[in-house]
């Protein structure tokens, strides 16, 4: 087996995994293997086309995971997309580059994760980024930025598309939002996200090609002699060499695309970066998890860690479409980050009181949904932190993602910090069987209340205010024949639950938190009860961030690489 032994094995050559692969293999005395279920998409036009969002959906690079019937959302399932490709989900995503609110990263430390706050993560956001300074015409058309908020020598190209919507539309939005009390935000990547702005993308602006994790972190260094990537190869479980004290992984069982089964050995560590909907399943298949789930499936328990797969959180996305009497050339997106006060205006304090008095009930409901694996008192502490972020800071509660193209405005919108939580678990000991994925969308009233308030805010406030209202013609979706003007909250709720989709931001199933509070990994991202297994992917985020996920995941993975190096 000597030929298949490496110092570090990374499972999943995706957004996070390739950052680790790059940074560890910078050290020439270290050998690194990456195991990736997918193949190269370097020349796949469904990936490279900067205007091709959605083209890859349903193709062979889309895992298209299915949820269970969602009890609190009309019993229907949801498709949770994620990519099977070198570069992972960064190869099919919407390319928005938007970080987090500073205080919500600080909250990671408040939860018990020493060393994780905005000030210590910011250098890693900057380290990963190579920002293309906007051209003069883009600034004329509304782009603003603060150079201090951007890295200009990292691997990841970011910037503004050349076919940014031209003309005065940014100004029209800006004046409209100002009229409803929402300010222009000069750079939403500063750690203060409240307001309206243009949003940068992960893109190679000059080449006009999507920038994904593989183009940024893998292809430029793919010929390093100490780095090997096994494409079309699926990890099925970890193998252990020592199970007394902290369990030590010896390596990983893999299946190649032709069905050959083999073992790849790790001298030092195994890093799971298979994504928020996969890494927890690999832990369970390897005997790390809840004995009540593993034992009936004939999986010997190696580490009794019942919280594996719990704490799963996603956001819910709804959309409006409006016609415009202003034919816009170019295609681009704008983001708006309202706070709870922007949405609930005069009723904010009543809403705050209602939610404050519901937190114990919410904690009990989520604890119950976890089969009491996470205690309601721990959840209550957690929810209090989230409540404070929402009601006592200027952390945004909603994102409006507005695409303006041709004669159409499309506004997608999602609650940023839902309280509902669910779980993801294996259904058998066969790694090819589909998992049981239950995000519990709309389980708690707060989440639905915010989507309802957001719907009314968009229709009745934003689109009805000047100067935008003079450019907006009919609302084509949902339209007033589907949801009448002045619809009741119940009518909005019916529409929202029948038309929402996953926002494709699952996090939390291997949360970084103290073990006794429900965590799966510690503040060095090491799995509790193991000596040499880490998780580095979206699953470690203890709760949602206000931005889109990749910017934060690149930063987290950069920091994780330094933590791994520090342990060498
Ligand atoms: P991934 O990047 O998914 O990497 C996991 C890798 O592991 C994959 O390559 C997978 O094939 C591989 N893998 C899985 N199981 C195995 C196994 N058993 N063996 C070997 N390999 C395995 N974020 C943004 O920042 N901006 C956006 O505009 C945006 N839009 C989005 C739009 C869509 C449609 C989707 C789906 C997501 C979007 N996101 C966006 C979210 C973001 O892209 C993801 O959260 C992020 O890429 C996840 O990174 P990750 O490292 O956790 O996992």
Image (cartoon, rainbow, N blue to C red):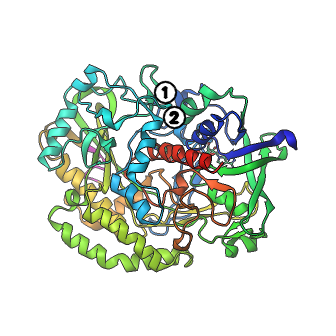
Residue at disc 2, secondary structure: loop
Q: Which mark is residue 49?
A: 1
Res 486 → quadrant? bottom left
Q: Position of residue 194 (x, y in %)?
A: 26, 49
Q: Could you classify mark 1 by the number of other residues whose Cα lies within 10 Å: few (under 14), some (14-19), or many (20 or more)?
A: some
- Marks 2 and 1 sit apart, C-alpha to C-alpha, by 9 Å
Q: Position of residue 292 (x, y in %)?
A: 68, 76
The residue under the point 39% across, 70% down is 383
Horizontal side, residue 537 vs residue 355: left or right: right
The residue under the point 56% across, 50% down is 537
Residue at disc 1, secondary structure: loop
Q: Are marks 2 and 1 in contact (CB under 8 Å)?
A: yes
In the depicted structure, whether residue 205 falls above or below residue 408: above
Asked if one can make out residue 417 in the rendered structure from this viewpoint, the answer is yes
Q: Which mark is residue 433?
A: none
Circle nearer the viewer, 2 or 1:
1
Res 352 → quadrant? bottom left
The boundaries of the magenta stretch are 475-481
Q: Could you classify mark 2 by the number of other residues whose Cα lies within 10 Å: few (under 14), some (14-19), or many (20 or more)?
A: few
Q: Position of residue 260 (x, y in %)?
A: 84, 43
Question: Where, quadrant-wise, is the N terminus in this rendering?
Answer: top right
Q: Position of residue 26 (x, y in %)?
A: 63, 34
Horizontal side, residue 548 vs residue 565: left or right: left
Q: Judge: label 2 CB < 8 Å from ligand 1.
A: no
In the depicted structure, whether residue 278 falls above or below residue 48: below
Res 73 → quadrant? bottom left
**Nearer to me, 487 or 405:** 405
Q: Which mark is residue 55?
A: 2
Does the segment drawn in magenta span residue 476? yes
């Amino acid at each position: 087996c000597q030929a298949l032994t490496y110092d570090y094995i990374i499972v999943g050559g995706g957004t996070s995994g390739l950052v680790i692969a790059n940074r560890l293999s910078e050290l020439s005395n270290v050998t690194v293997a990456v195991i990736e279920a997918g193949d190269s998409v370097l020349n796949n036009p469904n990936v490279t086309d900067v205007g091709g969002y959605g083209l890859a959906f349903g193709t062979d690079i889309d895992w298209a995971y299915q949820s269970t019937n969602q009890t609190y959302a009309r019993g229907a399932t949801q498709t949770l997309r994620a990519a099977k490709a070198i570069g992972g989900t960064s190869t099919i995503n919407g390319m928005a580059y938007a970080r987090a609110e500073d205080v919500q990263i600080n909250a990671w430390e408040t939860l018990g994760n020493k060393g994780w706050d905005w000030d210590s993560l910011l250098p890693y956001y900057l380290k990963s980024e190579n920002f293309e300074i906007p051209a003069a015409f883009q600034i004329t058309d509304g782009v603003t930025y603060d150079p201090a908020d951007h890295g200009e020598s990292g691997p990841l190209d970011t910037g503004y598309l050349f076919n940014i919507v031209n003309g005065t539309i940014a100004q029209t939005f800006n004046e409209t939002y100002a009229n409803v009390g929402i300010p222009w935000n000069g750079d939403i990547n500063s750690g203060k996200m409240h307001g309206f702005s243009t949003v940068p993308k992960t893109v190679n602006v000059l080449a006009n090609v999507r920038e994904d994790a593989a183009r940024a972190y893998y292809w430029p260094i793919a010929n390093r002699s100490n780095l090997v990537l096994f494409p079309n190869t699926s990890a099925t479980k970890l193998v252990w060499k020592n199970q007394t004290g902290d369990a030590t992984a010896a390596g990983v069982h893999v299946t190649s695309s032709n069905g050959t089964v083999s073992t790849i050995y790790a001298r030092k560590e195994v890093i799971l970066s298979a994504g928020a909907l996969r890494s927890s399943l690999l832990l369970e298949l390897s005997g790390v998890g809840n004995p009540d789930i593993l034992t009936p499936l004939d999986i010997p328990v190696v580490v009794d860690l019942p919280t594996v797969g719990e704490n799963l959180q996603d956001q819910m996305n709804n959309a409006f479409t409006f016609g415009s009497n202003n034919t816009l050339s170019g295609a681009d997106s704008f983001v708006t980050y309202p706070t709870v006060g922007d949405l609930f205006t005069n009723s904010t304090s009543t809403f705050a009181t209602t939610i404050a008095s519901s937190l114990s009930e919410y904690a009990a409901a989520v604890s119950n949904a976890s089969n009491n694996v996470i205690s309601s008192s721990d959840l209550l502490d957690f929810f209090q932190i989230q409540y404070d972020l929402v009601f006592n800071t200027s952390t945004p509660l909603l994102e409006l993602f507005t695409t303006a193209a041709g004669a159409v405005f499309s506004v997608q919108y999602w609650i940023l910090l839902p309280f509902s939580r669910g779980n993801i678990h294996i259904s058998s000991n066969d790694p090819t069987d589909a998992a049981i994925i239950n995000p519990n969308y709309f389980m708690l009233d707060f989440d639905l209340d915010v989507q309802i308030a957001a719907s009314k805010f968009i229709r009745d406030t934003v689109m009805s205010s000047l100067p935008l209202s003079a450019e907006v013609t009919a609302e084509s979706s949902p339209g007033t024949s589907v949801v009448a003007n002045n619809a009741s909250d119940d009518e909005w709720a019916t529409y929202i639950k029948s038309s929402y989709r996953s926002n494709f931001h699952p996090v939390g199933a291997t949360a970084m938190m103290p073990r006794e509070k429900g965590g799966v990994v510690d503040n060095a991202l090491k799995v509790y009860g193991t000596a040499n297994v880490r998780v580095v992917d979206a699953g470690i985020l203890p709760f949602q961030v206000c931005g889109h996920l990749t910017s934060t995941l690149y930063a987290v993975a950069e920091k994780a690489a330094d933590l791994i190096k520090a342990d060498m």
